[in-house]
Amino acid sequence: MIKSIFILFLLFTASVYSQSPDWSVNASSYQYNMTFTVFLNVDGTMLTNVNDKVGAFVNGENRGEATVVYNSNAKKYVAYLSVVANTVGETINFKIYDSTNNAIVDVVKTEVFEINKNIGGAFQSYSIAKPTLSSQAVINSFSFDGITLESNSIVNKTILIEVASEVDITSLTPVFTTESNSKVYLNKVLQVSGSNTLDFTNDVVFEVLSEDESQNSSYTIRVKKVVNTSDNDITFSDATYVFNGTEKFLSIAGTLPNGTTVMYSNNGLTNVGSKQVTATISGANFQELVLTASLTISPAIITGVTFSDANSDYDGSEKSILIEGIIPSGTELNYVSNSRTAAGVQEVFALISGDNYVNVVLKAVLTIRKASFNTSFTFNNKSFIFDGSSKSIAITENLPIDASIVYVNNDKTDSGIHEVLATISKVNYEDLVLKANLTITKARFNGFSFLDKSFIFDDTQKSIAITGNLPKDTTVSYTNNNLINVGIHEVIAIISGKNHKDLILKANLTITKATLSGFTFIDTSFVYNGEIKSIAIIGDLPTGVSVSYTNNNLTEVGVHEVTATISGGNYKDLVLKASVTITKNTLGTFTFTNRDFVFDGMQKSITILECLPTGTSVSYTNNSATNTGLYEVTATISGNNYENLILKATLRITEATLNGFAFAGKSFVYDSTSKSIVISGALPSNTSVSYIGNNQTETGEYEVVATISGANYKDLILKANLTITKATLSGYVFENKSFVYDEKPKTLIITGNLPTGTSVSYTNNNKLEAGIYEVAATISKPNYLDLILKAVLSISKADQVISFEPIVLPSDKNEFTLTATISSNLEIVYTSSNISVAKVSGSTISLVDSGVTIITASQPGNVNYNVAENKSQELIFSTLTTNGNFILNKSIVLYPNPVKLKVKLKTDLQEALEVSIFDATGKQVKKINNYQSEKDIDVSLFTAGNYFIKIKDATGKTTVKRFIKL
């Protein structure tokens, strides 16, 4: 068939065909953008078809769409959704197009629009699903395939597992269950329960991603081997040994698992006692096992020693008893009540003791018998004449050394015959008793005189007396004695007694006129007591006689002569002198006691406690001390009227306890300078502080010991922790940066100079694909905390522009290639709005039948390119009739165009025409049969837009005109 192609507006009715919904949006009409990396799930099934898509809507208005693509890095299907808006805070709703079931699914989940916010990533994507997926990221159980666990616990997302010692933990297959379809990853690689063999020598950290991927929990798997004491017959038991001088040890019994060792602490004991020994079994990847047992050394029993009674006669030498046998080394032999010299009986004890032996007490009796004197003694009778003295008799020989003699009825004075007993005694000897007579005869008196004596009359009786000492038991009696009147009087004195013959003596008593007499003025001594002292004559003053004193009434210590003058009208003056002596008094009792002080840097002294008498003072020697020590202090109390009193006491100053100090731990941030801590509190004089473990530079925790010492103080030891924490790195900037996708990798770098020893590493950098990436820069340096800076690397989608020139139909074929171009390297998608006129496959178009269709060139974009603005061209296609006749376009004119109310067709054709009007969707809205040229066609009720008029003549030939309704 010969086809003629010309540009005509042909309205047609399109047949309905099921295809993907068009949720595209013109991004240039919006100011702001928000991006999502999503995965789609409908009824529990992940959507993986490239025709599956998601749409974003605000109040029913489309704001973005994206199709599913495969991310090879994450090994999952995701969609990169870009949502646009002009207002912040709008609520975004989502719809899913399930291409497999050709169904559009409304999703309950919503988000609030935020400018430039990115939600989701390749690994942890945003879930758009119906029904809603679970947000639980939990491991419910964890074990190993084929392995019996000793213990298993999940605490605070740490899974602690203990296995038997023989298990090879370098090759274990995890078996686990999770909550609500949550997935387990290791280093971003999906783990399947029971399918992977892993090395659990060190802790393994799993990431658990919830079903909706909103939650990511880290679980640490820690596997330790345990030492099973029953399986290995391992025991660590108490043991008791009897002391034998060798060191004893405890050790475990049984076989240690391979790779373990045992360490003992507090082991080894030789002497008697008990201690707890600790055995610690440990090894790489083993749970440490600590066992304890008691090691006891009991005392040994001493044998082979005897202790027997002993008897001997007294000979003046020391007697004792000795044990028989040898005592063990390390023991001590002590005797109690051993060693006796004197005669007698005593019990002797032998005590054998030692720290490592049971004490032994032995008893024996030591007996020493008394000796007899081997010397003869003479004890003869003897006679004496009474002389008033005691008479006695004695043995003639010398007594043995240490012997004594006791006389009974010896030492007699009175006349008579007396039997005397002499008993000779000596310790350790039997007594010797001897007898003899002691005779005393009466004596004659002698040594007496009875002299004449003259008295001066004093109105008192006068008498005279014999001179000589009267022996004991003798008396004297006088006749005509005791006279008052003046004269010469003969007086007789008779001396008599039981042991003497009587003696008669005579003398004259003469009384003459005399001066005053009968007075005495005696020297007197007083002890000073602060009171007035005086003396007076002794004797009664006769009537009319008086006495006066000179230098009497004295107070002070000394020897003072006092004169007493007795005078009277009938007597001669009598002058008497005497001495008054006031001696120094002895000071009373004073308290001067030892005293203890604790050193406090102040002078210390001691004093007597009582008040001093008036006129006395006290002086101290070696008093007033400050430093520690023992001081003998002398207090001397003295005064003119007292004997000096010297007292002594000890002043002791003991070492003080240092206090008022604090030694607080302190933390520094590393700055390469030496750090130290010091005590707080003022040091007393002559004390100093020294430190151990101070002045540190590198980071770490150090125990510092401060010792405060001084001559007068007990050492004070304080401890505190000096901590140097890692410093914070600064001076680096890591800024966000945006790029537009250009097929080249994009990276971010920090700004700032890196000093020597400093390194920087980047995570999630060097990106090629469009998206929003959080890049972490980790700056590391010894003694510094890692500085982690984060910045956003934004690679926005590139714009792509389609150029689509008007379509030129070939004249010789029904198929040809569309030639639109695009600025990207993506494939252009062509669509025909009316496949009854033309069909499109790829870039090839096939003409079907006469009519008009809109050929649209589009590019939906991808992860790196925005959706291209569609470009469309009209394609009008018409075929000739079989005879080759057709209506020329120029033969029909449509006016006015655009039109508000009525439109007309002007034609040269005379026959009636069939006129049909279609809207832009191809729907027929009006039809007129038998239309005549320039007849009004009413379009006033049409809505504004594009319309097509199809004109058909009687032969069936057609043409199409387009007009715009205002």
Image (spheres, rainbow, N blue to C red):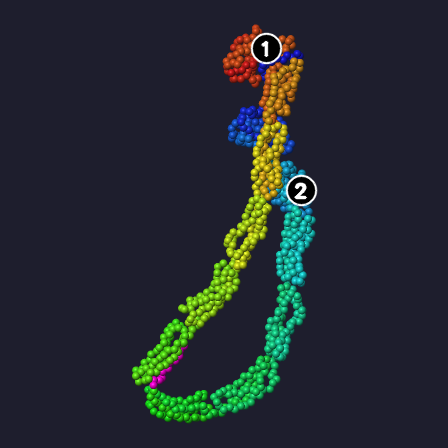
* On screen, residue 34 above or below 250: above
Q: Look at the numbered disc 1 and give the secondary structure of its residue.
A: helix
Q: Amino acid at mark 2?
A: Asp
Pick whichever, 316 or 287, lies toward us. Answer: 316
Q: Which mark is residue 196?
A: none
- Crowding near the residue tagged with mark 1, few <14, some 14–19, many ≥20 C-alpha atoms within 10 Å: some
Of all residues shown, which one is farthest toward the top?
Answer: 910
Pick whichever, 385 or 7, lies toward us. Answer: 385
Q: Which mark is residue 199?
A: 2
Q: Residue at x 57, y 25 (%)?
A: 23
* On screen, residue 553 above or below 144: below
Q: Earlier in the sequence, mark 2 or mark 1?
A: 2
In the rendered image, residue 576, in percent from the top left (x then y), is placed at: 36, 81
In the rendered image, residue 258, in percent from the top left (x then y), is placed at: 69, 49
In the rendered image, residue 34, in percent from the top left (x then y), is placed at: 55, 30
Q: Is residue 87 visible?
A: yes
The magenta segment is 515-525
Q: Amino acid at mark 1?
A: Asn
- Asked if the stretch drawn in magenta spans residue 524, the answer is yes
Q: Residue at x 41, y 69 (%)?
A: 615
Q: Which mark is residue 889?
A: 1
Q: Mark 2 near mark 1, Cβ–Cβ under 8 Å?
A: no
